[in-house]
Image (cartoon, rainbow, N blue to C red):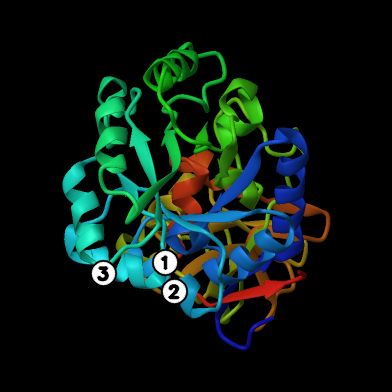
Amino acid sequence: MSPDRAEVVVDLDAIAHNVALALEQVAPARVWVVVKAGAYGHGDVAVARAALAAGASGLCVATVDEGERLRSAGIDAPVLLLSQQSARLAGRIVAARLTPTLYDADAMDALVDAGASDFPVHLKVDTGMQRVGVRPEGLADLVSALAERSPALRLEGVYTHLAVADRTGHPGTNEQLERFAEGLEGLDLDGALIHAANSAGALAHPGSRRDLVRLGIAMYGLSPGDDLDPSDLGLRPALALRARVGHVKRVEAGSSVSYGWRHTFDRATTVATIPIGYADGVPRRLSSLGGQVLIGGRRHPMVGVVTMDQLMVDVGNSTVAVDDEVVLIGSQGADRIGVGEWSAMLGTIDYEVVCGISARVPRRSIGG
């Protein structure tokens, strides 16, 4: 346990297990892992190293800063930027040897002007996400534009992103894959890597795997969608959120707790104050939705609104002391509170829960 008030503990053996499981399932496709947003709150450098050691062959990030951070840590694997970046960043992309995503010729020129030489790039095709990318009918012109900028730039990959792969019965995934195939038809792509699958695609839509898959949320042992239970898929959750009891007090029946006095005790009880709050990523409303913690292997309800730096727990007549371990996400004794429990209460997805754990909560890796 960290000497500080709270911590995120990341099991790198679980990361390795999940990568190995994906590699076995999607073979012969390669696996590139998504470590953007601090590896979904898990810690990008440690997770990247564990994933590469487990057999992943590339990494994916959202920003140049994220890619440079990996390079500064000595990681030399391919790092794909998942969207086209500002032309102002072209020099940094070239200097850090990050693999850019492109969908217009102006971005190509910015890289050439920045001194790119035999520089690998990926082209992104918008088959229905309608976020970024060239439409399938424009891909041929984009490939030609890239060829005109050889040998400064070379085509390494062409890809798309699936919008509804997490809804396994939705026809949209097949529709997107068909549009993607139509856009690729007749093009001389000179052995470029073709990819479409995110985690949900990789695990639930074999036709989307192509040459590589981009493994994101599944690497962390979390659900890629409502129809895909991570435990049924054999995935192991990698993240635990732990704190410790900061204060214990006995309170009277009829007294209230926290801002607004929104919770009133109907009996005399014991309240434990936990030094973690919404500034750390515990949503303010979680207590009103039934949020619980584990102390001594038993569940106890959060009471009153979660404050910026602290939350309160009704521990009844249990024996609880300052410095006792508190598990907000993870296992203690025979019980477990999963990320999915939070996301179901909050009406959101697992991604938002783990990405919402703030940077002021230190990350500690185990295993690996």
Q: Amino acid at mark 2?
A: Arg
- x and y, in percent, of residue 154 in the image: 39, 48
Question: What residue did someone put label 1 on?
Answer: 97
Question: What residue did someone put label 3 on?
Answer: 91
Q: Quadrant of residue 93?
A: bottom left
Sequence order check: which comes first, mark 2 or mark 3?
2
- x and y, in percent, of residue 56 in the image: 66, 53
In front of the other: 310 or 215: 215
- In the drawing, does residue 203 fall left or right of residue 126? right
In front of the other: 87 or 221: 87
Q: Secondary structure at mark 2?
A: helix
- x and y, in percent, of residue 171 in the image: 48, 11
Question: What residue did someone put label 2 on?
Answer: 69
- In the drawing, does residue 275 fall left or right of residue 259? right
**Can see residue 265?**
no
The CA span between labels 2 and 3 is: 16 Å
In front of the other: 212 or 226: 212
Q: Residue drawn at (48%, 41%), measured in percent from left and top?
A: 349
Q: Amino acid at mark 1?
A: Arg
The CA span between labels 3 and 1 is: 10 Å
**Can see residue 75?**
yes
Q: Nearer the viewer, mark 2 or mark 3?
A: 3
Q: Is residue 46 above or below residue 135?
A: below
